[in-house]
Image (cartoon, coloured by chain):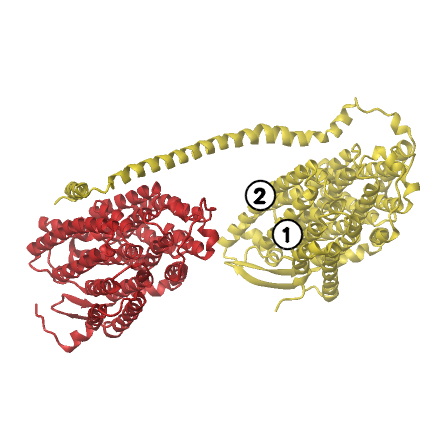
Amino acid sequence: MTFVLNSSILESLYPEIFLGLVAFGMLLMGRRVKDWVVYTAVSIISLLISMILLLLFDSSNSSFFGGAFVINNFGLYFALILITSSLYVSFTAGSELKHDPEIFFSIFLFVNVAMIIAAFSLNLIFIFIAFEGISIGTYILSAHGKSKRNLEASAKYFFTGVIATGFIVLGSSFYFLSTGTFNLVSVTSISLINKPSMLLAMILLFVGFGFKLALVPLQQWAVDAYDGTKNPVSAFLSSGTKVLAFLVILRVFLVGFSSMNTDVFYLFTIVSIVTMTYGNFAALSENNLKRMLAYSSIAQAGYLILVLDVVSSNASHFAFTVAIFAAMYYSLVYIFMKGGAFIASGAVREDKIMINDLSGIGLKSPVFAISLGIMMLALAGIPPTAGFFAKYYLFLALISGNLWYLAVIGILNSAISVFYYLKIIVVMFRPATEERDFNLSRPILIPVIIGAAMSIALSFLIYGYPYISSIVAGLGVGV
Amino acid sequence: MLNYAWFIFLTPIIFAPISVIAGKKAKALAGVLASLSILISLILSIVVWLNIRGTSTPIYQAYNWFDNINAGIYVDHLAVVMVLMVSFVSLMIHLFALYYMKDDPRKNTYFGETALFTGGMLGLIIASNLLEFFLFWELVGLCSYLLIGFWFFKPNAASAAKKAFIVTRVGDLLFIIGLAVLYSLLTVQGVSSPLSIPYLINNAPKIATEIGAQNLTIIGLLFLGGAAGKSAQFPLHVWIPDAMEGPTTVSALIHAATMVTAGVYLIARVLPLYANATALAPDAVLYIGAFTALFAGTIGIVVNDLKRILAYSTISQIGYMMAALGMVSTFGESVIGYSIYHLVVHAVFKALLFMAAGVILLSLMELRDVKKMGGLWKRMPVTVSLMFIGSITLAALPPTAAFFSKDTIIDVAYNYFIMNGSNAYSILPWIFLVIGALMTSLYTFRMFFLVALGKPRSKLAEEAKDPPKIVLIPLIILALLSLTLGVVQYRFYDFIVPGTTKVVVPMLAEYTPLTVVVIGLLITIALYATTSWQRINLEKNPVYKLLRAKYFLDALFTRVIAERIILPLSSGVSRVENGFSISIEGTGKGAMGFGGILRKIENGVIEYYFVFLIAGVAILMLLLEILGGI
């Protein structure tokens, strides 16, 4: 492995470098400027610029640092999704901050740097460092505000997160033990079938990375952390970092373990079924809005893992392509519908946001209520929203991969989830029991409307499905 | 570019909502708008008629609707005659309804619905695809339901509307099954637009060889089921008498002149299919038609409700039309001419009779029992004279139009007997139709004499008065037509099916129908023109009881089939359904409870979380050990 920096490598790192510099600049600015609007604007603009830089400099297929850092379209797609998610959250984040916006936003940008790096890394050490960058950043973000609730949530997140980090390190070392390298690409050719240490490495890595996805049995921090932190942070934790964790898992298991995929099939199957079912059932009887959304995001992670079921089951090329397409599409839709739902819960001016607190909002602001309703329908997977098509391709992949039972379980779970998603719509249009003052300022209303609009608009993407799937088939996923 | 013929049916459909909305503000406007739209349809129909009169090329314009269904319009000579009749009769009835419905608070709705109905009926006639045809068929069925139940606050009207809807639904189900069978068989053959009417009627022999005459027979019988439901043929006729609960103009428009003939039109439209099926399909049409003609007539002679007498006569007359169509195997397509001619004549005089009845009922405050009327000729001379013209036309006395149209059908039935081996089986239709003619004469003149002659038998009848002359103009036009339409008989036949020859029968057969009509007239004169009928007591007579009970068919349908078979069945189903929903609720509760248990895991104690995490990972590894095998 040679670490030689030349100009082409530097060019490829422009987005990360740029964001990092802006983040440092923000910390300096914090001495003079305390207005959150400024930081929101700077963060939005710099995220947009980094997106442009990504498109300009990272669109070519190149690999450097001895294959540890690979720039390809698959990674680029996810990097763009992740930054989109950050952009989406930035709209609303500033208005919820009471103090130190410069710290919040600079940490936020650092997390984004780490996310971009993670999206392109194909080396376990690189991934580990990037992942830790995200973890530590989000620990700080969730603690921001320093209220008792924030700190408690952050502490729980931190302590359980540390255990997950331990798993990643342990898994990486087992990986190194069996292959002699941390590089994911170079092991594809080696025959590793039935090597116990390899399977152990798989489980440990899955557990470690799956922590961010809040898969059962690693889900417990999620509910407390989402509930306890500020709405924008919950939105970010449940959309951006989740998609990233999913990408990393997909990467690691598609590339690093491609020769023994089928062995992990059981792992994915069990975890996906348990996670879906747990999330949906627990959400059924939950009265706290944010906790309910947290449970539902656990269930959504279970759906995402279904993709891994397909790709690890020796499925046909068609099923494989559909599954990857479903994963990419689901991730894109997910950041809007889930992020939007968490942001929307900011409309209630309380610490503990109960579902019933939303009653009467349908009369106060029909736009808000309809938008949130659309996102709920999208989460439930009801046509014609994009959420429906995301689930459609997911189940299509399962069925064409001959995993009927998983499709059936997934659909049953979706049916259960309709109950609690629709409950919110019903509550919103119910007359209020008591007079309530909702926070319908622009930083909340506009992202909610955008989320609803995207939940509908993204469904038109499927008209390009034949074209998109041909691209997906040629993506050279992971490599 | 749309052919202007599209607007024959589009105009009333477009005007329907406009007249409902406009009528909300200005009540009088609704009727005017609806009538205007139908006038436009009539003018367009006349233009179409003038255009295609000299040629045999129909107007055909169709676009791909979806998949292999082409939808559009198809106007040939048969269709143009029908649209002329429907738009004309509908216009007359609309004009009369301006008077008849003038005091109704919801008359904007009424006119909107009748305009929609007329549009649907016109669309049905010129539809170029059977699927499109079926949609319009359902649309008129819906309008019929709405209009029968127009006075929904009357419990009778509401239940009659329901009955009409449900009974015709049985027919519609058969019809759509027939459509599905035809569609699937032809799609297998690779036909590009399987349900397109021009394709079906131009390629009938080819279709018969491709899919088999047997299959075509099944399709024909299913279509006949649909036609029997809509056109009230035995045994699905039970809804029409009840449908008389609607406004009388509705009865005139829908249940006498236009919608009930849709079934006849359906069979006439696809008659080539019947001609190429095995003999069973046309025979079924013939025998059901002929039997209905007789059967409904026998009930008609004992009914006392003025409108129901007319309803049974409608069923009976449609039986004649059906019977004529059923003789297609012997006479070829010229039977369409015989049938449709009677259809048009019937529409004219039946609309006249219904509207005359409407005037009488309006004057008698909806008293409908003919036994309580009497002496009305003196009190309402114009109306009852118009009714007289309608009655002699219904009874087919010369020189009215029905004398030509109906007697031709009876004569054709006689020729059918001669040309089909002169056996007992093939003479049945003729016998049915001749006795049916006797029945027609009996119930018609019984009704007329009870209404018109003698002394008033109720206080209301004593005070009856003619309405203003101007509102009777539509009736007068129809009366003139029913007297004079006979002169176009053979030109009409020739227009519909070129080369129809004159029907010639032996003298004896030729005069039989007229003779039985005169016999009927004499009997009714003896009984009902005097007061002798009041001395007859038939209450104990078993035949009378049977007829009064309408052959117990209504009882069979409601008490046996509905109450004994369908109700227990549906209650059984609903019990299962109920159990199902209870179990669903149980599942819901169980799921909630389970969710509650799951949530208890999230108790906020972090040490507990660690235990759960490690234990969970351990279990996961154990499971993998068992399943995957390290």
How many numbered tags mark residues here?
2
Q: Give the residue type at disc 1.
A: Val
For chain B, the rendered hue is: yellow
The residue that disc 2 covers is B173
Q: Taking B281 as reference, is B355 left or right?
A: right
Mark 1 neighbour density, 10 Å: few (under 14) some (14–19) many (20 or more): some
Query: Horizontal and vertical percent for residue B442?
Result: 83, 36
Task: Kindly check if marks 2 and 1 are in contact, taking CB atoms under 8 A apart as contact.
Answer: no
Q: In the rendered view of the protein, which quadrant contains the C terminus of chain B?
A: top left
Q: Is residue B138 visible?
A: yes
* The one of B245 and A398 positioned closer to us in this rendering: B245
Q: Earlier in the sequence, mark 2 or mark 1?
A: 2
For residue B247, above or below residue B46: above
Q: Are marks 2 and 1 on the same chain?
A: yes
Question: How far apart, in angstroms, are the residues tagged by discs 2 and 1?
Answer: 18 Å
Mark 2 falls on what kind of element?
Answer: helix
Q: Taking A281 as reference, is B358 left or right?
A: right
Q: Give the residue type at disc 2.
A: Leu
Q: Please tell me in which quadrant of the rendered image residue B56 appears.
A: bottom right
Q: Is residue B519 visible?
A: no
Q: Which mark is residue A447?
A: none
Q: Taking A182 as reference, is B215 left or right?
A: right
Query: Horizontal and vertical percent for residue B253?
Result: 74, 49
Mark 2 neighbour density, 10 Å: few (under 14) some (14–19) many (20 or more): some
The residue that disc 1 covers is B270
Query: Horizontal and vertical percent for residue A4?
Result: 9, 73
Q: Taking A454 as reference, is B503 left or right?
A: right
Query: Horizontal and vertical percent for residue B313?
Result: 77, 40
Mark 1 falls on what kind of element?
Answer: loop
For chain A, the rendered hue is: red
Q: In the rendered view of the protein, which quadrant contains the N terminus of chain B?
A: bottom right
Q: Please tell me in which quadrant of the rendered image residue A459 appears.
A: bottom left
